[in-house]
Image (cartoon, grey):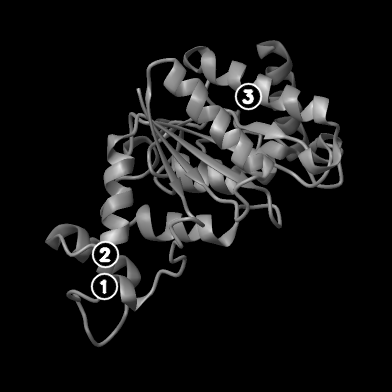
Amino acid sequence: MNTLIVHAHPEPSSFNGALKDTAVSTLRGLGHDVQVSDLYALRWKAALDAGDFAAERADAAYLDLSLEQEYAQAHATVAEDVRLEQAKLMQADLVILQFPIWWFSMPAILKGWVDRVMARGFAYSAGRKYDSGHLRGKRAMLCITTGTAGTLYTPNGIDGDLHHVLWPIHNGILAYTGFTVLPPFAAWMPGRVSEQQRTQYLTDYAAYLVQLDSVEPLYFHPHQDYDEHQQLKPDVVARSGVQWNPRAGQSFQQSAASERSRRLLDK
């Protein structure tokens, strides 16, 4: 198995760095090939702008980013740093995004990697998203750290259920481009727990990676569950835990309760 770890933390000796190192040693120990894109070490350019299309433009008078990304892909004029990352991504069977939760999302440098690398014409295109996204057949997962306790990321916690917090990434980036999305691994506030707990996090993460092939992916409704307006059909009860279907007589509370019950049964 080929794995790409996209690492986004400015401090090499951070706990994110320790998790990244654990993944590298564990997966290589299993005989897998592992590449790491350390975005801060690469001094990754986060902004998607006209500089990405300096070689040639589809329209030099007006910057339409989607149009220019497709044009660059079709004419092999992709910026060199983006081309290298896309090559790593194409080689990968598994992609791990390693990052701290900042403002309920990923650091800007990692979002910039997504903006530039997961380009239109490369990761998705018209009529090719979700089930038919260009990256279909690959798996992806998040390994994250938080600054607060896990009790805050529960359905009744002040920060909200972790699955809901990560939905824009899980659904809007990974599932959107065709990935099979695996459940995330979270190390809760590693900067404020004991050394013993930090060691346990690393042990647990290694164990998670060892049995990754048996992990059930997150559930996303297939294309056939949606109508021509891309809404769940009236007879489809939402199962993602984030969506709910009023046309099936379902409320948000019922959807959340159903997802919690499903997770308990899966354990």
Which quadrant holds the N terminus? top left
**Residue lying at 31% horizontally and 59% vertically, measured from the top left:** 81
* Location of residue 263 (image quadrant): top right
Query: Callout 1 environment at 10 Å: few (<14), some (14 to 19), or many (20+)?
Result: many
Contact? badges 1 and 2 (CB < 8 Å): yes
Specify whether 166 is left or right of 1. right
Q: Secondary structure at mark 3?
A: helix
Asked whether residue 41 appears in the rendered view, the answer is yes
Residue lying furthest left:
75
Q: CA distance from mark 1 to mark 3?
A: 39 Å
Q: Vertically, is 8 above or below 182?
A: below
- On the image, the x and y values in percent for residue 87 come to 26, 45
- On the image, the x and y values in percent for residue 90 come to 28, 39
**Residue lying at 51% horizontally and 18% vertically, measured from the top left:** 212
| Depth check, front residue: 5 or 78 | 5
Q: CA distance from mark 2 to mark 3?
A: 35 Å
Which quadrant holds the C terminus? top right
From the image, tell me which residue sits under label 2. 79
- On the image, the x and y values in percent for residue 73 come to 20, 58
From the image, tell me which residue sits under label 3. 205
